[in-house]
């Protein structure tokens, strides 16, 4: 059995969601892929029987704000055994909502579920990021199986903060619960993330397509386009109008080389999606 070692980020900064970004790492673009490698004796101690697709990325500044809120609330819980976990979630307008669990032997709700209700009470409909932390110095914790299923059903595009041996990473909820059951009455719509540098091109209609890797769930239909790191939390409604499967060899050589350079973990037989979209210029 091998050991998966989370290696150094690729020297070129890139957005995890498929757009090519050149230059050094900045506060405006900090989503780096973690490059896996198999070797014995890793200090990480994370054992896997095979090398899996890793969509774990460093938190952006806004993601970190959610993590900090959950951990700060957890530190204030004291010694009350009925409230031992805190959670925070950020909605699409940048508001952070907080809540704690309610333990009871009949099966009281986890903090992640309580915070969904708190956010809904405040009028939030679309949620971007969630984090939970334990009391008594336990720090960031991962959601349980029930919470993962609820998050997937109600907010299938949310990013979840999970702990590692070193720093927290962000994982799409779909990657935390693979091969899962999908609730047939789950809400319509999907969230498509761009780096904020693409805001003007998308809003002007200059950019109407994108190549995506490891986002096989994208489909034709209603969508909300979010510009990560935007100071006003800019987002706009629209739709994905076409999704076409493609491969690296089918792309222009320059484009293929750029994608490979920015996706160092992408295999030779990676399945790519060419996504066509439109935005509603009357949206927010």
Image: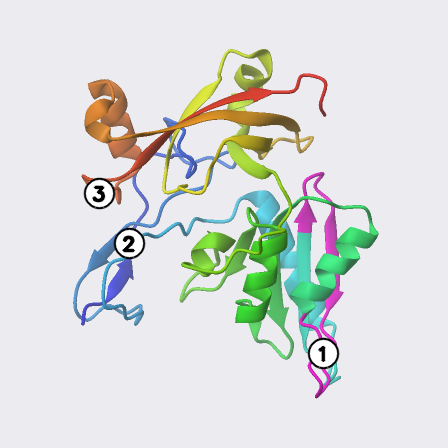
Query: Callout 1: helix, strand or loop?
Result: loop
Q: Are marks 3 and 2 in contact (CB under 8 Å)?
A: no
In the picture as drawn, the residue positioned furthest to the front comes out as 184
Left or right of 255? Residue 59 is right
Mark 3 to mark 1 CA distance (whole Å): 43 Å
Point out residue 71 in the picture as x, y percentages from the top left corner.
64, 65
- Residue at 18% across, 39% down: 268
Query: Callout 3: helix, strand or loop?
Result: loop
Q: Which stretch did the figure color magenta?
A: 90-110
Left or right of 239? Residue 168 is left
Q: Residues within 10 Å of mark 3 (few under 14, many from 20)?
A: few
The answer to whether residue 27 is above or below residue 3 is above
Q: Sequence-wise, which precedes: disc 3 or disc 2?
A: 2
Left or right of 205? Residue 51 is left
Q: In the picture, which quadrant includes the C terminus?
A: top right
Residue under numbered circle 1 = 108
Prevailing secondary structure class for the magenta stretch in the rendered image: loop
Residue 128 painted magenta: no
Mark 3 to mark 2 CA distance (whole Å): 17 Å
- The mark closer to the camera, 2 or 1, is 1
Residue under numbered circle 2 = 7
Residue 96 painted magenta: yes
Q: Sequence-wise, which precedes: disc 3 or disc 1?
A: 1
- Residue at 75% across, 84% down: 80
The answer to whether residue 193 is above or below residue 185 is above
Point out residue 257 in the picture as x, y percentages from the top left corner.
22, 26
Q: In the picture, which quadrant includes the N terminus?
A: bottom left
């Amino acid at each position: 059995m091998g050991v998966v070692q989370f290696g150094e980020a690729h020297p070129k900064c890139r957005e995890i969601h498929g757009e090519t970004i050149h230059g050094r790492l900045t506060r405006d673009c900090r989503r780096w892929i973690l490059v896996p490698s198999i070797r014995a004796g890793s200090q990480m101690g994370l054992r896997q029987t095979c090398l899996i697709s890793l969509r774990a990325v460093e938190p952006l500044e806004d993601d970190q704000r959610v993590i900090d809120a959950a951990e700060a609330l957890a530190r204030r819980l004291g010694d009350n055994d009925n409230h031992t976990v805190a959670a925070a979630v950020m909605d699409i307008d940048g508001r952070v909502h907080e809540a704690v669990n309610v333990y009871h032997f009949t099966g009281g709700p986890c903090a992640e579920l309580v915070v969904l209700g708190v956010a809904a009470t405040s009028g939030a409909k679309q949620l971007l990021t969630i984090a939970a932390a334990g009391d008594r110095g336990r720090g960031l914790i991962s959601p349980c199986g029930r919470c993962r299923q609820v998050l997937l059903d109600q907010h299938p595009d949310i990013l979840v903060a999970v702990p590692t041996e070193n720093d927290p990473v962000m994982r799409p909820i779909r990657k935390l619960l693979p091969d899962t059951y999908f609730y047939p009455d789950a809400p319509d719509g999907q969230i498509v993330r761009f780096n904020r540098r693409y805001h003007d091109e998308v809003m002007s209609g200059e950019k109407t397509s994108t190549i995506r890797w490891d986002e096989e769930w994208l489909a034709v239909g209603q969508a909300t386009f979010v510009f990560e790191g935007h100071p006003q939390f800019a987002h706009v409604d629209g739709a994905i109008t076409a999704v076409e499967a493609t491969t690296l060899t089918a792309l222009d050589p320059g484009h293929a080389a750029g994608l490979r350079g920015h996706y160092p973990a992408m295999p030779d037989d990676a399945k790519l999606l060419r996504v066509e979209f439109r935005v509603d210029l009357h949206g927010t």
